[in-house]
Image: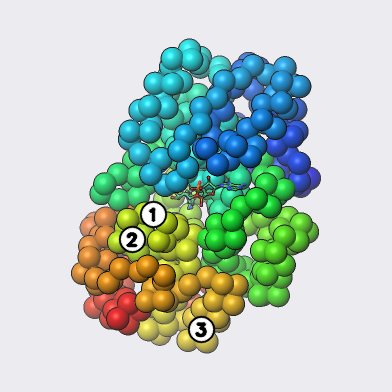
């Protein structure tokens, strides 16, 4: 097991990465519990696979527990599911000293974290992320929230977990498509500021996807180290943390156009969005076109679709509607979109004055 720390003074916490952590969860979380009582939130798919294992480990550690099993899928990050979960938690008479445990992917983590942030004006929560995406990104850093009809993640709170247990063993049951979607977020860290890691992924990415435990541990640890560093520096995203949104402005627009459903998963949208962001960087002359091509080549080589026109089941992409979705981005400053661009692989930066005509023409070239 590898252990990293997110350094946030009295809210610092550990990220444990390794195999068999769900079986050991009771013992691992005991030191951070105010009282030996938890409420586990999971989804139907993950619940069928791992809830009994988790509950057994809580029993062995003498931790009292209740649980709720929610529908799987992005639709669960909604006001309706939040309200229903809060009602279930209150009906179970959770107290301020009760800790919520999110067992699942980013959907369960974001929803449970937000419920923890607002329940009884704030209770503790623990992340047990079960997708690659949630292990390398969403479980770390304290962004929690839900989607609204006006866009993704527009309602939420910063609320840090007390501990994160990233069990690489559970990735064995994750469908390949979900694994690949999470892989896009892994690649993101290389593109932001770690060209050596990008090079390592070009060589070992497929091993990781094919189940090599050492490659998985290395990639997840590297990603979590990078995220922990950024979060410690800029928890509330007043600066550098926004780099983690590389690919997300375009990606959220593609997701919104496909209805946040099975046509395009979040990580898949990030892969497409990163490719467009580097094309834009090349178009404005800051990024060598070879680097934009290298990113596309790697994402394609592992099996991700980077060309929106080649997405199975893709809608007829509408340029104006995509641009309209981008205008609902959370990262607006004085009504303008902040883009994450790159001067090359490993050199991402924030750009607040991108020429809208250039954005339009690059996006048009990507979809038409
Ligand atoms: P998800 O939670 O929907 O999980 C994907 C699917 O895999 C689900 O159907 C789930 O039931 C299933 N699953 C999960 N673990 C499994 C396992 N071990 N074996 C088999 N099936 C399993 O999706 P996700 O990709 O983990 O997360 C996406 C969400 O994360 C989005 O809502 C996105 O906005 C959010 N996100 C948040 C942050 C953040 O900082 N908070 C960062 C990135 C993404
Ligand atoms: N996933 C972006 C962030 O956590 O800031």
Disc 1 target residue: 261
Q: Which mark is residue 293?
A: 3
Mark 3–mark 1 distance (CA, rounded to whole Å): 28 Å
Position of 57 relative to 231 (above/below) = above
Label 2, ligand 1: CB separation under 8 Å: no
- Please name the residue shown 41% across and 70% down the image: 312
Dot 3 or dot 2, earlier in sequence = 2
Position of 63 relative to 13 (above/below) = above
Q: Nearer the viewer, residue 60 or 359?
A: 60
- Please name the residue shown 71% across and 20% down the image: 59
Q: Are marks 3 and 2 in contact (CB under 8 Å)?
A: no
- Please name the residue shown 72% across and 17% down the image: 62
Q: Element type at marker 3?
A: helix
Q: Position of residue 23 (x, y in %)?
A: 74, 34
Label 1, ligand 1: CB separation under 8 Å: no
Between disc 3 and disc 1, the foreground one is 1
Q: Mark 3 packing: few (<14 Cα in 10 Å), some, or many (20+)? A: some
- Left or right: residue 128 versus residue 268 is right
Q: Is residue 337 visible?
A: yes
Q: Are marks 2 and 1 in contact (CB under 8 Å)?
A: yes
Q: Are marks 3 and 1 in contact (CB under 8 Å)?
A: no
Location of residue 333 (image quadrant): bottom left
Q: Is residue 12 visible?
A: no
Mark 2–mark 1 distance (CA, rounded to whole Å): 7 Å
Between disc 3 and disc 2, the foreground one is 2
Q: Position of residue 65 (x, y in %)?
A: 61, 19
Q: Position of residue 320 (x, y in %)?
A: 21, 69
Disc 2 target residue: 258
Q: Element type at marker 1?
A: loop
Q: Nearer the viewer, residue 269 or 201?
A: 269
Mark 3–mark 2 distance (CA, rounded to whole Å): 25 Å
């Amino acid at each position: 097991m590898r252990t990293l720390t997110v350094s946030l003074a009295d809210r610092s916490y550990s990220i444990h990465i390794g195999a068999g952590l769900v079986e050991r969860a009771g013992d691992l979380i005991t030191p951070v519990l105010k009282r030996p009582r938890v409420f586990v939130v999971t989804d139907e798919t993950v619940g069928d696979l791992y809830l009994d294992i988790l509950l057994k480990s809580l029993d062995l550690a003498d931790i009292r527990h209740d649980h709720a099993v929610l529908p799987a899928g992005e639709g669960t990050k909604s006001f309706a599911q939040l309200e229903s979960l809060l009602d279930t938690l209150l009906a179970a008479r959770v107290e301020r000293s009760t800790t919520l445990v999110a067992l699942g992917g980013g959907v369960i983590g974001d929803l449970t974290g937000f419920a923890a942030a607002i329940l009884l004006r704030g209770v503790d929560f623990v992340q047990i992320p079960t997708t690659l995406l949630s292990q390398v990104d969403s479980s770390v850093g304290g962004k929690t929230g839900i989607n609204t009809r006006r866009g993704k993640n527009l309602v939420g709170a910063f609320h840090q977990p007390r501990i994160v247990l990233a069990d690489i063993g559970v990735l064995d049951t994750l469908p390949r498509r979900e694994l690949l979607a999470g892989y896009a977020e892994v690649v993101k860290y290389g593109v932001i500021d770690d060209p050596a890691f990008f090079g390592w992924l070009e060589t070992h990415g497929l091993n990781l996807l094919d189940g090599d435990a050492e490659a998985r541990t290395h990639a997840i640890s590297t990603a979590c180290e990078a995220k922990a560093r950024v979060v410690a520096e800029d928890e509330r995203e007043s600066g550098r943390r926004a780099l983690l949104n590389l690919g997300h402005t375009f990606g959220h627009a593609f997701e919104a156009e496909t209805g946040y459903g099975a046509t395009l998963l979040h990580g898949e949208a990030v892969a497409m969005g990163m490719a467009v962001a580097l094309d834009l960087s090349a178009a404005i002359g800051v990024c060598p076109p070879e680097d934009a091509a290298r990113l596309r080549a790697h994402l394609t080589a592992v099996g991700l679709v980077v060309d929106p026109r080649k997405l199975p089941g893709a809608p007829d992409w509408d340029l104006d509607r995509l641009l309209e979705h981008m205008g609902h981005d959370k990262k607006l400053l004085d009504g303008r979109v902040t883009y994450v661009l790159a001067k090359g692989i490993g050199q991402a930066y924030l750009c607040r004055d991108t020429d809208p005509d250039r954005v339009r023409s690059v996006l048009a070239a990507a979809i038409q």
